[in-house]
């Protein structure tokens, strides 16, 4: 089964999930990679700390705005990657059709939460971004053969 539609999910869709989205877009330029939040403010902007990472890493997210997860997004996704165990439970409870294809970003290792850097320092954002990069690359390696070239 090909994985051509990947949805990354966090709380507000302005920090963690867009960074994971950008990294996975770089890894899979032909796949559809999107992000959303379980409690997003529609149209919310990324904090300056996240934007600095986006610019430095040349992630394709400069026009990113927060958006709330919806049933059509969930239905279209082949795999859904969340940042926290509580988000996994929320997504699967709200959208039962997501069960079996929703995982924590850290699934291949600890399954622990990716800490929310919102309203934290730039150095904290950098640490979280390094963690996100590490775990998105694990997903990229595992999904690589299953994403259409």
Image (cartoon, rainbow, N blue to C red):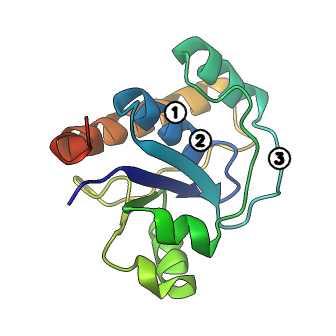
Lower sequence index among marks 1 and 3: 1
Determine the residue positioned at 23% across, 52% down.
109
Residue in the image at 35% along x and 50% along y: 4
The label number, if any, that marks residue 18 in the structure image: 2
Secondary structure at numbered mark 3: loop
Cα distance between the residues tagged 1 and 3? 17 Å
Q: Nearer the viewer, residue 29 or 20?
A: 29
Residue 12 image position (x, y, % from top left): 71, 55
Q: CA distance from mark 2 to mark 3?
A: 12 Å
Residue drawn 36% across and 34% down? 28
Marks 2 and 1, Cα distance to the nearest angstrom? 6 Å
Task: Check if mark 1's residue and mark 3's residue have beta carbons within 8 Å.
Answer: no
**Which residue does the numbered mark 1 point to in the structure image?**
22
Mark 3 lies on residue: 44
Disc 3: CA contacts within 10 A as few (<14), some (14-19) or many (>=20): some
Q: Is residue 36 or residue 114 the one in the foreground?
A: 36
Mark 2 or mark 3: name the one nearer the start of the chain: 2
The crowd level at tag 2 (other Cα within 10 Å; few <14, some 14-19, many 20+) is many
Dot 2 and dot 3 residues touching (CB under 8 Å): no
The kind of secondary structure element at disc 1 is helix
Q: Is residue 79 above or below residue 85?
A: above
Quarter of the figure with the C terminus: top left
Horizontal side of 91 relative to 79 (left or right) equals right
Residue 103, relative to residue 118: is it above or below? below
Figure disc tally: 3
Element type where label 2 sits in the image: helix
Residue 5: percent from the left, percent from the top?
42, 53
Mark seen at residue 30: none
User: Taking 88 as reference, is 103 left or right?
Assistant: left
Confirm or deny contact between disc 2 and disc 1 (CB under 8 A): yes
Q: Residue 37 at x, y = what percent?
A: 65, 60
Q: Quadrant of the N terminus?
A: bottom left
């Amino acid at each position: 089964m090909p994985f051509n539609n990947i949805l990354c999910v966090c709380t507000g869709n302005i920090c963690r999930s867009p960074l994971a989205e950008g990294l996975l877009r770089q890894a899979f330029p032909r796949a559809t990679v999107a992000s959303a939040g379980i409690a997003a403010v529609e149209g919310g902007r990324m904090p300056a700390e996240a934007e600095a990472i986006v610019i430095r890493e040349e992630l394709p997210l400069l026009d990113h705005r927060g958006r709330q997860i919806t049933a059509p997004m969930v239905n279209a996704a082949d795999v859904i990657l969340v940042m926290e165990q509580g988000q996994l439970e929320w997504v699967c409870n709200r959208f039962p059709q997501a069960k079996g294809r929703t995982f924590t970003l850290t699934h291949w290792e600890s399954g622990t939460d990716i800490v929310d850097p919102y309203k934290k320092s730039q150095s904290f954002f950098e640490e979280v971004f390094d963690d996100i990069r590490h775990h998105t690359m694990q997903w990229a390696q595992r999904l690589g053969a299953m994403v259409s070239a």
